[in-house]
Image: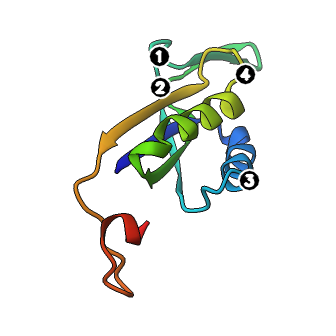
Amino acid sequence: MKKIEAIVRPTKVDHVKTELEDAGFESLTQYDVKGRGKQKGVVQQWRGRKYCVDMLPKSKIEMVVSDDDVNTVIDIIQKTASTGEIGDGKIFVSPVESVVRIRTNERDGDAL
């Protein structure tokens, strides 16, 4: 099992969620987060003054999937969240040792 964490633009979350659900991946968690990448934020101008906004609003999607589904989920997120511009986000994949469904005590693959 793998945990997939995707940092995407907030405007893309609903589209990513819909595409994942259509492909059979309903379970996910979404957070509103702030962050920055290599560009270290953006410089904006308001009333003639420049302001550096170094922490930009992003959304984080987390989900745990079977090893066989990792590439499918990554492809869906990448295709759906991409605008081709700086700030589209990143996808991180980590191993998951165990999963337990609290209600039924199902474990690992059965708990997904």
**CA separation in Å, label 1 and label 4:** 19 Å
Q: What residue type is labelled 1?
A: Lys
Q: What residue type is labelled 4?
A: Thr
Question: Closer to the camera: disc 4 or disc 2?
Answer: 4
- Mark 1 neighbour class, 10 Å CA radius: few under 14, some 14 to 19, many 20 or more: few
> In terms of secondary structure, where does tag 3 sit?
helix
| Amino acid on which disc 3 is placed | Asp
What residue is rendered at 61% in x and 29% in y? Answer: 78
User: Mark 3 or mark 4, which is nearer to you?
Assistant: 3
Residue 100 percent across, percent down from the top left: 30, 73
Q: Mark 4 points at which residue?
A: 83
User: Cα distance, mark 4 to mark 2?
Assistant: 17 Å
Which quarter of the figure has residue 57?
top right
**For mark 1, what is the residue?**
40
Identify which residue is drawn at 61% across, 15% down. Answer: 86
Query: Where is residue 96 shown, x and y percent of the image?
Result: 28, 51
> Image height check: is 39 above or below 99?
above
Residue under label 3: 22
Q: Position of residue 3 (x, y in %)?
A: 38, 47
Residue at (68% x, 44% y) in the render:
16
Which of the marked residues, 3 or 1, is nearer the chain's N terminus?
A: 3
Check contact, mark 1 vs mark 2: CB within 8 A: yes
- Within 10 Å of disc 3 (Cα), the crowding (few <14, some 14-19, many 20+) is few
Sooner in the amino-acid sequence: mark 3 or mark 2: 3
Mark closest to the chain's N terminus, 3 or 4: 3
